[in-house]
Amino acid sequence: MAINLEKGQRVNVNLPKFVVGLGWDANASSSGSEFDLDASVFILGENKKILSDSYFIFYNNLVSPDKAVEHTGDNLTGAGDGDDESIKIDLSKIDPKTTELCFVVTINDAETRKQNFGQVRNSFVRIYNPDNNEEILKYELEEDFSVETAVEFGRLYKRNSEWKFEAVGVGLKGGLQDFLNKYN
């Protein structure tokens, strides 16, 4: 049975391979433009910085050099039920210098389209076992992000040789560049 996390809660992830699914629904936009939300992963070392540019996984760089993290592709509309974007994780292949994976979702071209996470609902991040589709954990973002255009959904981090997931749910008014500035 899946664990439903609250903001700040942490749980052990005891699977070597799993999928991180991210989902959302957009309210009808008064800007007249479709929403294009993008999931990204920052693969970080001890210094809380990405190991190298190739360890920033997003729609234009789908696989990490160690083949441990694979983005399954960009969903341009978020239409339909379930996961909108997915990231496959194989911890057995992860670069030994990796200490953390940060999962973020940003709104593409948010400023031009006058969009923010206040117009997004039913946002979640979940981890499931791809072998049997069993959901291990789920974190539903219930915060009201009225001006934020980027949200750190969660992070997977290594402590004492164990991997744990933390439900983060912290927004930024900015975009992907703000996260790049933070982690680069």
Image (cartoon, grey):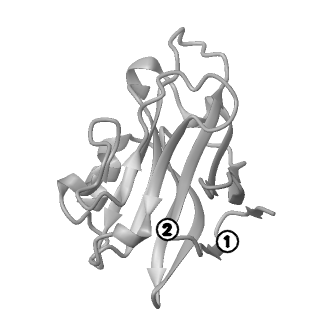
**5 lies left or right of 50:** right
SS label for mark 1: loop
Residue 158 in which image quadrant:
bottom left
Q: CA distance from mark 1 to mark 2?
A: 12 Å
Instruction: Find residue 32 and report its horizontal and vertical position in percent.
Output: 54, 8
114, above or below 139, in the image: above
- Residue that mark 2 sits on: 156
Of all residues shown, which one is farthest toward the top?
Answer: 32
Instruction: Look at the image and tell me whether residue 134 can be seen.
Output: yes
Instruction: Find residue 137 and report its horizontal and vertical position in percent.
Output: 69, 61
- Of residue 104 and residue 119, the one placed in the foreground of this image is 104
132, above or below 60, in the image: below
Quarter placement of the C terminus: bottom left
- Residue that mark 1 sits on: 9
Of all residues shown, which one is farthest toward the right?
Answer: 1
Residue 68 in which image quadrant:
bottom left
- Of residue 109 and residue 128, the one placed in the foreground of this image is 128
Q: For the residue marked with disc 1, what is the amino acid?
A: Gln
- Residue plotted at (41% across, 34% down): 73
**1 lies left or right of 58:** right
Which label's residue is closer to the chain start, 1 or 2?
A: 1
Instruction: Look at the image and tell me whether residue 172 can be seen.
Output: no
